[in-house]
Amino acid sequence: MTKKTLETANYVEAMGQLLDLDLKPEHLPGVINNFAKIYAIASLVTEFSLPDDIAAAPVFEP
């Protein structure tokens, strides 16, 4: 198990306890795997740099 996988596993288990989720031990590997995939996809969005002077448009115009 890599350090990143171990950190993801620890995070999933801690959040499961914090949110009082009934995560069965046999489901943990799948939940951890899915969380790692979601994290990788979300990183593409969060790491995309935007200019400092950008403003949200109040109306969408394609």
Image (tube, rainbow, N blue to C red):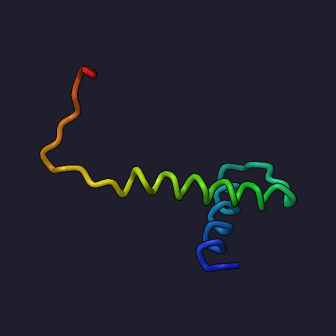
Residue 16 quadrant: bottom right
Residue at 68%, 67% in the rendered image: 9
The residue located at (80%, 49%) in the rendering is 22
Image quadrant in which the C terminus is located: top left
Q: Is residue 54 left or right of residue 19?
A: left
Looking at the image, residue 11 lies above or below residue 60: below
In the displayed structure image, the side of residue 31 where residue 52 appears, left or right: left
In the rendered image, residue 42, in percent from the top left (x then y), is placed at 48, 52
Q: From the image, which quarter does the N terminus lie in?
A: bottom right
Q: Is residue 8 above or below residue 27?
A: below
Which residue is depicted at the point 27% across and 54% down? 49
Left or right: residue 46 compared with residue 54: right
x, y percent for residue 54: 17, 42
> Residue sitting at 66 percent across and 62 percent down?
14
In-image side of 1 versus 49 (left or right): right
The residue lying furthest to the front in this view is 62
Residue 15 position, x and y percent, is 64, 57
Tell which of 12 and 38 is nearer to you: 38
| Residue 15 sits above or below residue 60 on the image | below
Res 48 quadrant in image? bottom left
**Total numbered circles:** 0
Give x and y (percent) for residue 18.
65, 55
Dividing the picture into quadrants, the one containing residue 43 is bottom left
